[in-house]
Amino acid sequence: MVQVGTPPVWSRRRVEPAEAPDRTPWRTDHPLLGCDYNPEQWPREVWQEDVRLMREVGVELVAVNVFGWAEIQPAPERFDFGRLDEVLDLLHEHGIGVNLGTGTASPPPWLTTAYPQVLPVAEDGTTRWPGGRQAWCPSSPVFRELSLELVERVASRYGRHPALRLWHVSNELGGHNALCYCDASAEAFRRWLRERYRDIEAVNQAWGTSFWSQRYGSFDEILPPRLTLSTPNPGQALDFHRFSSEELLAQHQAEAAVVRAHSPLPVTTNLMVTAHQRDMDYWDWAPHLDVIANDHYLDHRLADPAAELAFCADLTRGLAQGRPWILMEHATGAVNWQPVNIAKQPGELLRGSVAHLARGADALCFFQWRASRQGAEKFHSAMLPHAGTDSATWRETIELGTILRSLPDLAGTQVSAQVALVFSYENWWAADAPNRPSELVVHLEQVHQAYAALRAAGVGVDVVRPGAALEGYRVVVVPHLYLVRDSEAAVVADFVADGGHALVTFFSGIVDEDDRVRPGGYPGAFRDLLGVTVEEVHPLAEGVVLPLEGTSGGTVRRWTERVRLDGARAHRRLGAGPLAGHPAVTVHEHGTGRAWYAAADLDPDALRALVEEVLAGAGVDPEPGAGPLVEVVRRRSVPAGSGPDFLFVLNHGPDPVLVPARGTEVCTGQDVDPTLEVPAGAVRIVRLAAEEQS
């Protein structure tokens, strides 16, 4: 191929893999403000204004070349890096670091025209065509070869560029093409199954193919779970999800390996830890990223978008194993892909950004820098909106940049919690599969309800994967964990036996890793821990609400169970309906600890009351001043005492609140002692006094 333009001096010497230096860990000595930048959408004369305004607002990290494939490889035999060279040099000249994309997120039209076999195929067998983005099959060998050739060109050219701070593989991998059902995917799926099971009879056993005459005689007979006339095999669908997640991870790993051969700098990709993304198992992805990065956008279709944001930030920190992480994308205002794209209210930009900062982010980046004038995202908000710098968005962004520059000693501090919440992607796949007892019960809603109760109770939460070590926690919450391995359930049981407290919610422990029901009664893997046997589940019809027995109030909806006590005692009982008098909440002394079971779908107030009782019994104290509308989160220096601790207070309510604190408030510069007043809708960050350190 012919390369257009002369490589700059700093990239003329190619770095061979054998010479690749040791990896440089991600670190920053202060919180960064960043953005996505798409200079290819703008003429050169705009670029100078862009970098001047970036400096004005405090932007220090810019993602470029995320969708640059058609720009730098306009034809199969032609590469042109001229404009990208100029952009990187311009950013470096103005002291702005680069988060460089590999450019592979969306193939150019020439590629899918020349190689139509690259295009993804949907569950119904129809091809998905170019014209949007991510029009490629994760199992396509042609796409893999051509994409890695592009990465080789980019990495060898820019691996030593002085502006470079971070590598950005592809973009939101699997956001649109996570599940492909084409023939290449079918062959890759069969190869994956051979490696996993070795023998076809092991597949038959795992998938339960004796049901409906589905027994396979060879791997060659297996297809992806394409659209069927009836319910597809659940085991096959579960394994296809696992396979598909690993295929996309393999694409990331292949690109990252090329990059690492040419550059010592950290490599990541932007995950999508949100309510929308359920197709990639990020617990398996996380160990392969040099730093965890996430994209998050408020979803106003949810009952409590702010609580979902907090959960996703805590889950992202869990993926990072407690270490600082990067918010790679969020929005200054409205997005463009919801049915009604709600603009952010005054102060909401700052509250949302600081919520991520409070929960461990050390960089806050927006999509995007300058609002597009054309294309599918022209009505997506940006740091520099269509209205320009004379706008509320620009002024609030300036305010955020000022606050970040006032926190030079925040970077590297970490969040710690006494409560763990167990969350599993593969359980999500299985728990929401067809033909479950009630489609009114949705897995993520159950997780969000449990998390919301903990957040409203004012305690910090670490989100962990099943089987994660639980030492150091006082309480573990296990919401709706339908699929769990015996070894993972044993970790919870051992935690309680050693003095911990656990709250398990209904329809947990039901099946093993093959989606095979455990005999003997529900909750299966947790039956002995909880001291109960569920003989039968009794879902409730839509709109049916039953009271709980007693004067404490509370109701249940959607789900009840016929519970037999096998050592546990009933804590709350159903007050009406066919199971009136049956336990709705039980508690069991197990070893030196205590295990609680919510056998019904409690209303939010009843669930919060239960959570508060569990926390109090375990000796977990809430953060003073925290509540349903007030978030109070601490970031602590590591190691303890090596620097200041910080207290974040976010007031989502309509009235001012008072929170106990001593130290210096960053947003206003005022000394605080003994209480901090936080106006309605405002955020405050206190650099705590020495005596307040913990």
Image: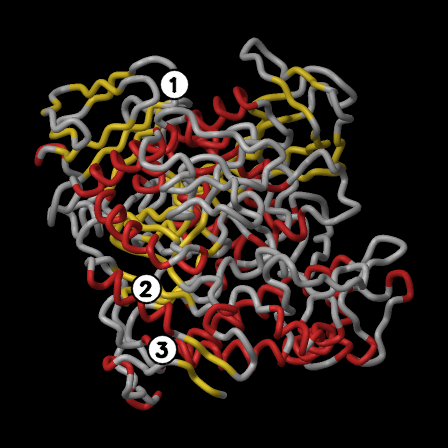
Q: Is residue 103 left or right of residue 585?
A: left
Q: Residues within 10 Å of mark 3 (few under 14, many from 20)?
A: many
- Badge 3 marks a residue whose secondary structure is helix
Residue beneath disc 1: 653
Nearer-the-camera pick, 532 or 621: 621
Q: Is residue 535 left or right of residue 682?
A: right
Nearer-the-camera pick, 230 or 182: 182
Of the residues shown, which amino acid type is indicated by label 2? Val
In which quarter of the view is residue 287 placed? bottom left
On residue 87, the disc is: 2
Q: Which comes sooner in the sequence, label 1 or label 3?
A: 3
Please report the residue visible at 67 percent of the width from the left and 39 percent of the height from the top: 533
Please report the residue visible at 59 percent of the width from the left and 12 percent of the height from the top: 550
Above or below, 191 against 451 in this view is below
- Badge 1 marks a residue whose secondary structure is loop
Mark 1 touches mark 2? (CB < 8 Å): no
Decide if residue 287 is in sight here: no
Picture coordinates of residue 455 (x, y %)? Answer: 41, 31
Picture coordinates of residue 346 (x, y %)? Answer: 37, 24
Q: CA distance from mark 2 to mark 3?
A: 22 Å
Q: Nearer the viewer, mark 2 or mark 3?
A: 2
Nearer-the-camera pick, 487 or 76: 76
On residue 248, the disc is: none
- Badge 2 marks a residue whose secondary structure is helix
Q: Single out the residue that lies furthest toward the top.
A: 551
On residue 260, the disc is: 3
Above or below, 120 against 599 in this view is below
Of the residues shown, which amino acid type is indicated by label 3? Arg
Decide if residue 136 is in sight here: yes
Q: Which comes sooner in the sequence, label 2 or label 3?
A: 2
Q: CA distance from mark 1 to mark 3?
A: 47 Å
